């Protein structure tokens, strides 16, 4: 292997988790970004990934990789920027360990982040959420687990990483049902739960196997559940719920849509964006403003409070075709021709 492999291994296994104290999810995301990058460059340069040199990760090749993400993999600008952020972090790490790559690092740091469209969020109505919660079968162990996961994801507004990372000690039922969440940026929060949510969680615990994994939710083999595993489970039950609710077919439902649905449900109930931000564990209100833009109630109240300008009365009458033809023939330019 070339010098790229040991530097990249040190960056992912030591620098990120130990020096930067990045979460395991961040380390996995960065590792996946470099997995795609080295595979892309190996195909483009006609070599093996283990033979790539650091000098081959130059700015032109990085730009080609970013273009490949958007055109062939159909990634959004936000995903493209996330991959670029991982590459820039690696070259900031290299700057203090490999002086010869300083110029190369500067050219890569000069690659700008692409502006992305700030679209309205997708969320489910209360009726759609209820149909989705009723989709899992309660006659099987996996159905009890799936119902508990979907219910908790919506009730607490959890990110998928927070949901699959929950441990047994993070959920308590006495004296008040509550869940302890370690969120993004290592921000902790405690959220009370509905009695209905506590009921479905108790039903899952009654049939849960006492495996070696400490996570609250387990996969079919008794191990910890992955993020992609929950995405598969959710997609399966969305397909079942779509049979009775065709409106679900028009929406792209991901695990994060459950979080958005919780936020919109809380906003409609409280009319207080600060409570929504507190519930979701946002670092600032700026992240929560997206739900205000998606909520039509605020706009309707503003529309009703403002008096619209008046409209002058009048009636449009179409001109007579014969008179219009005669008028055109009496034009002086007509005879000049």
Image: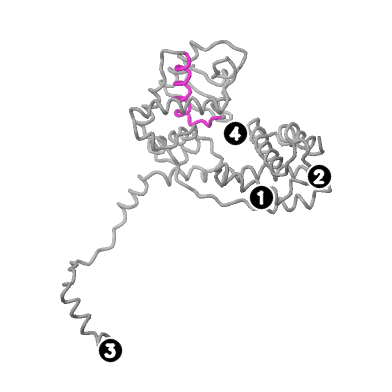
**Of marks 1 and 2, the one in the foreground:** 1
Dots 4 and 1: beta carbons under 8 Å? no
Mark 1 surroundings: few (<14), some (14-19) or many (≥20) residues within 10 A: some
Dots 3 and 1: beta carbons under 8 Å? no
Mark 2 surroundings: few (<14), some (14-19) or many (≥20) residues within 10 A: few
Dots 4 and 3: beta carbons under 8 Å? no
Q: CA distance from mark 4 to mark 1?
A: 34 Å
Expressed as whole percent of the image width and height from the top left, the position of residue 236 reads 45, 25
Looking at the rendered structure, the secondary structure element under dot 1 is: helix
Dots 1 and 2: beta carbons under 8 Å? no
Expressed as whole percent of the image width and height from the top left, the position of residue 254 reads 48, 33
**Of marks 4 and 1, the one in the foreground:** 1
- Magenta portion: prevailing SS class: helix
Q: Which residue is mark 1?
A: 63
**Of marks 3 and 1, the one in the foreground:** 3
Q: CA distance from mark 4 to mark 3?
A: 83 Å
Along the line of sight, the residue nearer the viewer: 330 or 147? 330
The first of marks 3 and 1 along the sequence is 1
Q: Can you tell which quarter of the image residue 78 is in?
A: top right
**Of marks 2 and 4, the one in the foreground:** 2
**Residue at 46% across, 28% down:** 235
Q: CA distance from mark 3 to mark 2?
A: 84 Å
Expressed as whole percent of the image width and height from the top left, the position of residue 32 reads 65, 35
Q: Which residue is mark 4?
A: 187
What segment carries the magenta color? 141-160
Looking at the rendered structure, the secondary structure element under dot 4 is: loop
Mark 4 surroundings: few (<14), some (14-19) or many (≥20) residues within 10 A: few
Q: CA distance from mark 2 to mark 4?
A: 30 Å
Q: Which mark is residue 96?
A: 2
The first of marks 4 and 3 along the sequence is 4
């Amino acid at each position: 292997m070339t010098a790229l492999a040991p530097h990249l291994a040190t960056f992912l296994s030591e620098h990120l988790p130990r020096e930067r104290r990045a979460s395991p999810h961040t380390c996995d995301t960065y590792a996946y970004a470099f997995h795609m990058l080295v595979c892309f460059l190996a195909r483009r340069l006609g070599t093996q990934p283990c033979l790539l040199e650091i000098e081959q990760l130059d700015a032109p090749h990085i730009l080609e990789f970013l273009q490949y993400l958007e055109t062939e993999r159909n990634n959004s600008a936000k995903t493209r920027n996330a991959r670029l952020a991982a590459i820039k972090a690696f070259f900031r790490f290299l700057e203090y360990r490999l002086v010869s790559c300083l110029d190369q690092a500067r050219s890569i740091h000069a690659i700008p982040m692409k502006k992305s469209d700030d679209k309205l969020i997708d969320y489910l109505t209360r009726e759609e959420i209820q149909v989705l919660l009723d989709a899992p079968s309660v006659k099987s162990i996996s159905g009890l687990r799936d119902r508990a996961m979907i219910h908790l994801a919506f009730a607490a507004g959890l990110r998928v990483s927070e949901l699959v990372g929950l441990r047994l000690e993070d959920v308590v039922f006495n004296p008040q049902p509550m869940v302890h969440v370690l969120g993004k940026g290592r921000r902790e929060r405690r959220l009370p739960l509905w009695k209905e949510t506590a009921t479905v969680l108790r039903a899952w615990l009654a049939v849960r196997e006492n495996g070696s994994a400490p996570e609250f939710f387990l996969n079919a083999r008794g191990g910890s559940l992955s993020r992609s595993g929950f995405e598969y489970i959710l997609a399966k039950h969305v397909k079942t719920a779509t049979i009775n609710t065709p409106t679900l077919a028009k929406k792209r439902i991901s695990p994060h849509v459950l979080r958005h649905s919780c936020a919109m449900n809380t906003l409609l109930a409280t009319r207080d964006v600060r409570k929504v931000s507190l519930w979701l564990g946002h670092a600032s209100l700026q992240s929560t403003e997206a739900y205000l833009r998606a909520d039509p109630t605020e706009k309707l109240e503003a529309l009703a409070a403002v008096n619209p300008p008046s409209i002058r009365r009048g009636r449009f009458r179409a001109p007579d075709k014969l008179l219009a033809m005669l008028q055109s023939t009496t034009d002086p330019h007509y005879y000049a021709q």
